[in-house]
Amino acid sequence: MFTITLKGAPDKNRPDFAKITMIIYRPGFNRVPKVLPVTGPYKNWDQSQQRFKPRTENATANNALLSSTVNKYSQVANTWDEQKVVWTPKELSHYYDKPRELMLRETVVPTVEQVYRKWIQEIRETKKMKNGHEVPCESYAHTNERILEFLSRFVKEKYGRSFSNLQFTDITEQFMKDYVFFIESEGAKTKSRGGLRGKLHSLYQVVKKASKKNVPGADLDVFICTNEKFREVETTPSTISMGLLRAMESMDRSLLSKAESYHLDLFLFCFYCGGMAPIDAAYLTWPCIDLKKRKITYERIKTPKKARPPFVPRAEAIAQKYRSECYSDFVLPIFSAKHDTHPKKKTRMSHVCGLVNATLRRIVGLLGYDEEITWYSARGTYITMMVDKKYPPGVVAEHSGNSVITIYKFYWKNQNEGDIIAELCEEFGN
């Protein structure tokens, strides 16, 4: 649905003559004016009828030209609507200013929503093999669907327009600044950052995809103004002290139930295997382990990176302890035959993580320590231990399946900061 109206006003250069402007409007878009090469005495213009008064100077010729012009543009718009082409008032206003072939190509321009949804569908249909098992990307697709819903709400609340009409030409630097402010404002309600980096990264991927296909208006430079927002906030690594780790290794297991002892073994197994993430431990299979070389090679579930930690005797002892309880070729008894789909595996992991974390907190209390701990702490603890023992950063990165930058930025925790500060104060004191 659209409207094309004519508006007459005194010409700035010749006040006695009318400047006729054609106004193109389509719901969800700004009105676009286009000055027409038609003029006549302003006193003869009838705004209510949108034409020159009959029987006045050149009225018949001018009105015929105006009617013909409006009809030409209306026919183009109606044709586009019949063909279900997504078009903008700006495109229509310039239709006869450019070669027809070029404009026909430009009008079949996908909207931001169309590219977004196609990308999400591609993610959903993507299947990857990780360590011999199929792992779909449904969770990543679902995450981006929620971000798309959030972005749609932002466009509606901020600009009062439907997201379905948003073009890539609308994603400007000001749009990005408004979007960042909206995300942070929503995050402030829950005292968080509102998932700022994830939302910006998601939109960036869509604009990047459109840019590669030369979609008009898809400009990655508009994200430059958000560079500071892309920087990670300071994080505290999920790491426990080696004192607590050693105490957990040697603790009296008569204090634990069979299930709790199993949970402790899961934690220690991940620590011994290069700080393996819980999800990677769950999907680990025996074909990933070379017993002769005592080496594990596996592809991480959440990233395309490979990790190659050693398979030390203590890790092997835990694996052998539960081997008869394992389903298929899994190394640990986390999944069973009934966990035959990815959603079921995801639900199972969420449940087991909750149980393991509860057990670990109880163990820390039993041992008399006051430290935060989760199953994932095994990762930061292993990396910190290796760095502190002066192993080459490249070796630590290979064991954990991360880059050197990542292990220092997110996992290594300076356990001796107090001693370092004391030494520096002594060195540079008065």
Image (tube, grey):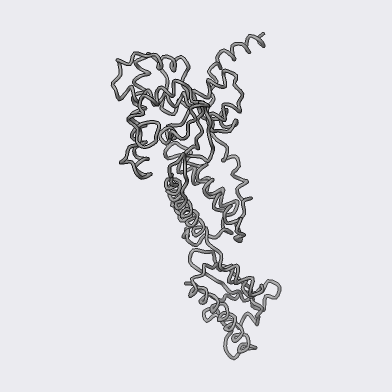
Seen in the picture, residue 138 relative to 374 is either above or below; the reply is below
Q: Residue at x 66, y 74 (%)?
A: 99
228 or 344: nearer the viewer: 344
Question: Considering only vertical position in the picture, is 30 above or below 175?
Answer: below
Percent across and percent down for residue 380 are 49, 26
Q: Residue furthest front?
A: 292
Residue, x 57% and y 68% (percent of image)?
107
Total marks shown come to: 0
In which image quadrant can residue 88 be found? bottom right
The residue sitting at the left extreme is 257
- Looking at the image, which residue is at 61% across and 73% down? 95
In the image, residue 61 lies at what x, y percent? 63, 88
- Placement of the C terminus among the 4 image quadrants: top right
Residue nearer the viewer, 71 or 36:
71
Residue lying at 65% horizontally and 82% vertically, measured from the top left: 40
Q: In the current view of this chain or complex, which residue is farthest to the right?
A: 13
Is residue 274 visible to us here?
no
Q: Is residue 188 visible?
A: yes
For residue 361, side relative to residue 56 (left or right): left
- Residue 81 percent coordinates (x, y): 49, 73
Q: Nearer the viewer, residue 108 or 261?
A: 261
Residue 323 in the figure: left or right of residue 179: left
How far across and how far down the image is residue 339, in percent?
A: 33, 41
Which of the 4 image quarters holds residue 346? top left
Which residue is outermost to the bottom?
55
Q: Is residue 73 above or below residue 223?
A: below
